[in-house]
Image: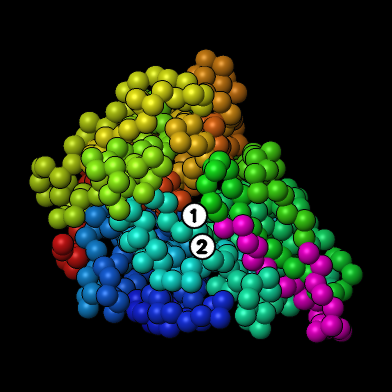
């Protein structure tokens, strides 16, 4: 299961799920891909070998990649893709990060099957801030389509409509007992009565936030993304695509069999979603009546239970006091949400969105367009002009009631490749404001190259005068992905101390292809140690 020889081979293999076999892109023939287990301070050298027929890149989700955007991975942002038959060696060092992260393809929809866990242990001899159990288990939540996900995406991009929802959710690659033809492969986790284990839960799903629970067992949250949290106990967690959550689980119930289960937390109104439930089985050892007894099923919140989702996320705090920027140099207000683009030929097969439109999404009315001829980072490094501009509007062009009735004229974003430039070392605040254009929805926003403090969150329109005084500047969580509540806002702060071009996007991949993304350009500071390292010699060319 663990990575051998630091080689990641990306290749199509037949995979059978839900009674059907189709060829899909895997890593080293495994699904999910291999777990990378390293220590803080380790330098990694991982060669990605592309034997698939698609362009591909790999992203080490949450790794800060200080001064080293060349190893970050999003295609056409920090590198050109690795073409079929080619390879690229990712070289990077883990610097002051501990916890659970993960890696995934960052090329169109390849991440649906190309992903795995990235576990960062503390430096040798460094303690955990809680009693670390002997045994730990990665729990990777994913999504499965009966077809090659790249074909699902292609159809959606062609028609301008929403892509088909997935056919199953998965736990460590398996749908579980509630799906057809899946029982025999359901993941089983043996546990001894009285034993405590740590679950490293990762949401690798493409398009869905998830609730997760284990029947009759409480979960003690001790970490989220690459950060230790103040421990708290809960019976259910909500996790957005991109996030990780570490929980302790003690086998303190009557010996037997218990389901762990995950299903969608879904907030978009009138939108189809995958309403199925994935399960795995926690089995007390020694197994007495393992085959005969039906496992007990956990209670999961209703699909639209925003109260439970919000209350859970709000409980996540840093383990101890942290250094949050108190003064702000760059105060940014970003609307995040869906939109529609008018079609010139309304009845064409390419306009299957609502009322003959194409679906779009934007940040501050700019729907991001990726370049195709070079990566943004390489163009910037070589001083090439013309593939992007830095006039990204720091506030939306028109003020409106973001969560109320939005006039139709404001529904249509412009398409462009615009970056926002930040001075090295500046203190940055970004408020993400969901809009009710088309529908309100939770948008899990992910920033590459950084961990940020989540200082506040609320429903309705953000009000700087009344909301800012309530910000948590003492022990806010430090994360790489945070949900913008449906019809609400979330505020983050960070110091722009990592030069380079860093992708900022909604981790719901449907929204990503519709343009809910942009990039921050953090300029070099004065001196060698504040500047981006030179690119590696084998950096892929477009
Ligand atoms: Cu998990 Cu831009 O990625």
**Residue corresponding to mark 1:** 207
| Count of number-bearing discs | 2
Label 1 secondary element: loop
Label 2 secondary element: loop
Distance between the Cα atoms at labels 1 and 2? 9 Å
From the viewer's perspective, is residue 478 above or below residue 82? above
Please give the range of residues in magenta. Answer: 274-297
The secondary structure that dominates the magenta segment is loop
Residue positioned 46% across, 59% down in the render: 164
Residue positioned 68% across, 43% down in the render: 305
- Relative image position of residue 206 (x, y in whole percent): 47, 58
- Mark 2 neighbour class, 10 Å CA radius: few under 14, some 14 to 19, many 20 or more: many
- Relative image position of residue 302 (x, y in whole percent): 70, 48
Q: Is residue 161 visible?
A: yes
N-term-proximal mark, 1 vs 2: 2
**Residue corresponding to mark 2:** 166
Select label 1 or label 2 by which is in front.
Answer: 2
In reply to whether residue 54 is colored magenta, the answer given is no
From the viewer's perspective, is residue 122 above or below residue 418? below
Instruction: State the residue in front, 130 or 22.
Output: 22
- Relative image position of residue 36 (x, y in whole percent): 47, 71
In reply to whether residue 295 is colored magenta, the answer given is yes
Instruction: State the residue in front, 208 or 406.
Output: 406
Q: Is residue 475 left or right of residue 119?
A: right
Residue positioned 74% across, 72% down in the render: 282
Picture quadrant where residue 330 is located: top left
Q: Is residue 36 visible?
A: no
- Relative image position of residue 159 (x, y in whole percent): 33, 53
- Mark 1 neighbour class, 10 Å CA radius: few under 14, some 14 to 19, many 20 or more: many
Q: Are marks 1 and 2 in contact (CB under 8 Å)?
A: yes
């Amino acid at each position: 299961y663990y990575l051998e020889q630091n080689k990641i081979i990306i290749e199509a293999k037949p995979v059978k799920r839900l009674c059907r076999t189709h060829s899909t892109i895997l890593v080293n023939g495994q699904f999910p891909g291999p777990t990378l287990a390293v220590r803080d301070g380790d330098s990694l050298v991982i060669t990605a070998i592309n034997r698939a027929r698609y362009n591909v890149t790999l992203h080490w989700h949450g790794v800060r990649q200080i001064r080293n955007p060349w190893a970050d991975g999003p295609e056409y942002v920090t590198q050109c893709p690795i073409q079929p038959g080619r390879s690229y060696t990712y070289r990077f060092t883990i610097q002051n990060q501990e916890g659970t992260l993960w890696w995934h393809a960052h090329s169109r929809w390849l991440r649906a099957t190309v992903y795995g866990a990235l576990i960062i242990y503390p430096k040798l001899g460094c303690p955990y801030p809680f009693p670390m159990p002997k045994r730990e288990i990665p729990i990777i939540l994913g999504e499965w389509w009966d077809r090659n996900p790249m074909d699902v995406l292609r159809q959606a991009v062609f028609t301008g409509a929403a892509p088909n929802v997935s056919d199953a959710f998965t736990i460590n690659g398996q749908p579980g007992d509630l799906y057809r033809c899946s029982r025999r492969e359901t993941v089983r986790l043996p546990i001894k009565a009285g034993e405590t284990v740590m679950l490293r839960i990762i949401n690798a799903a493409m398009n869905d936030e998830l609730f997760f629970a284990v029947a009759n067992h409480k979960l003690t949250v001790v970490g989220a993304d690459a950060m230790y949290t103040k421990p708290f106990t809960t019976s259910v967690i909500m996790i957005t695509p991109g996030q990780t959550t570490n929980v302790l689980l003690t086998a303190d119930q009557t010996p037997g069999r218990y389901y762990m289960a995950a299903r969608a937390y879904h907030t978009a109104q009138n939108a189809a979603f995958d309403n199925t439930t994935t399960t795995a089985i926690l089995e007390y050892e020694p197994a007495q009546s393992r085959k005969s007894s039906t496992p007990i099923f956990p209670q999961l919140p209703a699909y639209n239970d925003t109260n439970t989702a919000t209350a859970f996320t709000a409980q996540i705090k840093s383990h101890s006091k942290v250094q949050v920027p108190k003064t702000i140099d760059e105060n940014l207000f970003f609307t995040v949400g869906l939109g529609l683009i008018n079609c010139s030929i309304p009845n064409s097969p390419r306009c299957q969105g609502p009322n003959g439109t194409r679906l779009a999404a934007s940040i501050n009315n700019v729907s991001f367009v990726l370049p195709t001829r070079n990566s943004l980072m390489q163009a910037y490094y070589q001083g090439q002009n013309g593939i992007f501009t830095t006039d990204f509007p720091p506030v939306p062009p028109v003020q409106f009631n973001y969560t109320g009735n939005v006039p139709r004229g404001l529904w249509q974003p412009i398409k462009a490749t615009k970056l926002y430039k930040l001075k090295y070392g500046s203190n940055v605040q970004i408020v993400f404001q969901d809009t009710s254009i088309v529908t309100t929805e939770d948008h899990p926003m992910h920033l590459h190259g950084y961990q940020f403090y989540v200082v506040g969150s609320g429903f309705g329109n953000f009000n700087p005068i009344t909301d800012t005084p309530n910000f948590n500047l003492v022990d806010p969580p430090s994360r790489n992905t945070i949900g913008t509540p449906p019809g609400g806002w979330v505020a983050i702060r960070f110091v722009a101390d990592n030069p380079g071009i860093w992708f900022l996007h909604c981790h719901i991949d449907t929204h990503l292809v519709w343009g809910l993304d942009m990039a921050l350009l953090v300029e070099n500071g004065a001196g060698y140690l504040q500047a981006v390292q030179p690119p590696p010699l084998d950096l892929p060319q477009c």
